[in-house]
Image (tube, coloured by chain):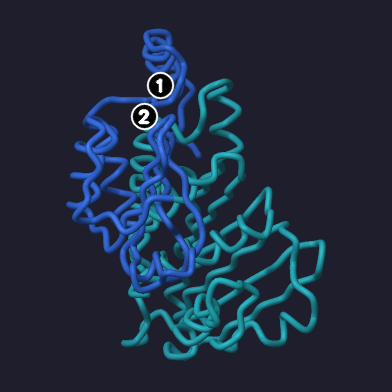
Chain colours: A cyan, B blue
Amino acid sequence: MLEISLHILDIVENSTRAGAKTVSIDIIEDTERDVLSLEIRDDGSGMSEDVLRRVIDPFFTTKTVRSVGLGLPMLAQAAERADGRFIIESKGGEGTRVAADFKLSHIDRQPLGDISATLVTLVAGNKDIDIIYRHEHNGQTYIFDTREIKKELEDIPINHVTVLNFIRSHITEGLKEIGAEA
Amino acid sequence: MAKLTIADLKKIKDKVHSETSLRAGEHRAKVTVHMGTCGVATGARAVMDSLMGAISEANVSDVIVTTSGCAGLCSQEPMVTVELTGQSPIVYGNIDANKMRQIFMRHVMQGEVQTPFAIAKV
């Protein structure tokens, strides 16, 4: 993965396959503390303690179609490479929380990348899941919440291409407005 | 979400409603972009971007777009499955933004399977 936004896409796709109905994604860019933090929380099926213990082992996966599971190990490695840390908490039947911190100014920190492309892809492929994206940059906050959009759209599916184009520009403009720069 | 105005969404709602009333209601095709770790790492998001752009340009609203997980053929990613209504799904491998555009224009819109990129008929 070359961008943090691709890790987000990958992790949230995991959430959807764990049966999550709501996924929250929080990004905080704090220039003063020199930290970029990412947190993803879902209400999916969660993991047992045994699975949770082995989840950042690249040679462990719950899938049967292949023998490696690289998504979480790659995010953990990306965080550690940028003087950060990776935390995962999960409870069977309740959901999962994945958090990663990065040193904002670290030369090896991946760029956040195209977050609007990630969110549009998630909404396009998972119209029944609610996504709440919160991005804070030095105290200014942008929030994107599919529940609000769905409420306004009524019978129009949120993954209609016209709506997705609207969502893309909304996110791009919103992030520009708060001066997101990671 | 200050900039998300009701007026904007109402415009979208009206536009979509007027388009929907013109067609029969059945969808033309379902396109699945494989979005496992392997797909994401090799460019599936750019493929999805290209697909959305092509749908938008063609101005069609009867194509269902969805994502799926890893199918176990990681070396063939990014992969895309196209299922025209009433026909067998065709799986394409090693897809990029340009190939996706071609598959959309030729297979989804005109029904011609793009055999050079096809890896399986399910």
Q: Which residue does the numbered mark 2 point to in the structure image?
A: A162
Query: Which residue does the image show at 55% across and 60% down from the upper left?
Result: A12
Say which chain tag 1 marks.
B
Residue A104: image location, x then y, percent: 41, 79
Residue A13: image location, x then y, percent: 54, 59
Name the residue nearer the viewer: B65 or A65: A65
The answer to whether residue A33 of the structure is visible from this angle is: no
The amino acid pointed to by label 2 is: Thr
**Quarter of the image containing the C terminus of chain A?**
bottom left
Q: CA distance from mark 1 to mark 2?
A: 7 Å
Depicted A92 relative to depicted A49: above or below = above
The amino acid pointed to by label 1 is: Ile
Which image quadrant for residue B109?
top left
Name the residue nearer the viewer: A81 or A13: A13
Do the CB atoms of the residues marked 1 and 2 lie less than 8 Å apart? yes
Left or right of B118, for residue B31? right
Q: Secondary structure under badge 2?
A: helix
Name the residue nearer the viewer: B51 or A182: B51
Name the residue nearer the viewer: A162 or B101: B101
Q: Are marks 1 and 2 on the same chain?
A: no
Query: Which residue does the image show at 80% across and 70% down from the upper left?
Result: A91
Residue A63: image location, x then y, percent: 61, 72
Left or right of B62, for residue B71? right
Mark seen at residue B12 = 1
Q: Secondary structure under badge 1?
A: helix
